Amino acid sequence: MSSPRGLTFDGNGNMIVADNSNHRIISFAMYCPPNATTTTLPTPQVTIPMCQPAAWNQSFTVLAGSSGNAGTSSTLLYHPYSSFIDIYGNLYVVDNYNDRIQYFPRG
């Protein structure tokens, strides 16, 4: 990551990060195997148990934008600042340098 900004969690407990200088939104799976040691992350809305090894997980999925490519098209981001996932799984991104809110439907 480069200049990570906003942090949120989706309905499955996956951690979503605005990777600002890489112009993308990425997701880290927070799956814990049975009998794993967990750490509790307190958030304003809910307390989230997280598998300790997942905190250092280098595997991620790009949800929006493109690794290192900024742009103004509907598929690109330019220094995303934060994101939000609604109850239907739709992703909203504050696309800072493009002065817009980007909407990405679920799926």
Image: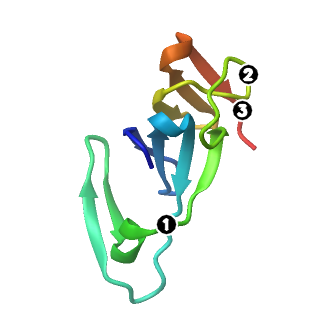
Camera-side mark, 2 or 3: 2
Question: What element does badge 2 sit on?
Answer: loop
Q: Residue furthest bottom?
A: 35
Callout 3, which amino acid?
Pro
Q: Residue at x 26, y 64 (%)?
A: 40
Say which of 85 and 73 sits in front: 73
Say which of 5 and 9 sits in front: 5
Q: Which residue is mark 1?
A: 58
Q: Say which label, 2 or 3, has the lower sequence index.
A: 2
Image quadrant where residue 45 sits: top left
Question: What element does badge 1 sit on?
Answer: loop
Q: Which residue is mark 3?
A: 105
Callout 1, which amino acid?
Gln
Asked if the residues shown at circle 3 and circle 1 are in contact, with their CB atoms under 8 angstroms apart, the answer is no
| C-alpha span from label 3 to label 1 | 26 Å
| C-alpha span from label 2 to label 3 | 12 Å
- Decide if residue 35 is on the left or right side of residue 78: left
| C-alpha span from label 1 to label 2 | 27 Å
Q: Which residue is mark 2?
A: 74
Question: What element does badge 3 sit on?
Answer: loop
Callout 2, which amino acid?
Ser
Asked if the residues shown at circle 2 and circle 3 are in contact, with their CB atoms under 8 angstroms apart, the answer is no
Q: Residue at x 31, y 82 (%)?
A: 37
